Image (tube, rainbow, N blue to C red):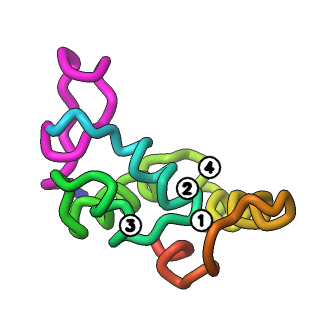
Amino acid sequence: MAFERITVDPARMGGQPCIRDLRVPVATVVSMVDEGMSVDEVVDAMPDLEPEDVHAALRFDAETDPAHLVMPGVHRIASLLKRWLLGTHQGAVRREHLDA
């Protein structure tokens, strides 16, 4: 599958997959969502991003992360459960957190 909003340039950000050449790594966006931020909150925190960028980052992560290929969704569920148990999860767990 082609990812139109995800770019990889060995000369930029150490070759990390980024959002539209913006020097915003996919991993950063995925971490923000994993930490409980909604798509709108991520876009508010990073005004250069669009909601479609966040969705593209989550799809890219889900389709390229070996852990997700073996057991889809387990990574996000485990991350949310860990934060809930530690009392560090902010906000409610929403369906969009689990969809990729």
Q: Position of residue 42 (x, y in %)?
A: 36, 60
Q: Which residues are magenta?
A: 2-21
Q: CA distance from mark 1 to mark 3?
A: 24 Å
Q: CA distance from mark 4 to mark 3?
A: 26 Å
Q: Are marks 1 and 2 in contact (CB under 8 Å)?
A: yes
First in sequence: mark 3 or mark 2? Answer: 3
Q: Nearer the viewer, residue 22 or 62?
A: 22
Q: Position of residue 2 (x, y in %)?
A: 19, 55
Q: Which numbered disc covers residue 41?
A: 3
First in sequence: mark 4 or mark 1? Answer: 4
Q: What residue is shown with label 4? A: 67
Q: What residue is shown with label 1? A: 72
In the displayed orientation, state which residue is furthest to the right: 85
Give the vertical position of 67 relative to 82 (above or below). above
Q: What residue is shown with label 2? A: 69
Question: Residue 34 vs residue 9: left or right?
Answer: right
Q: Nearer the viewer, residue 20 or 87?
A: 87
Quarter placement of the C terminus: bottom left
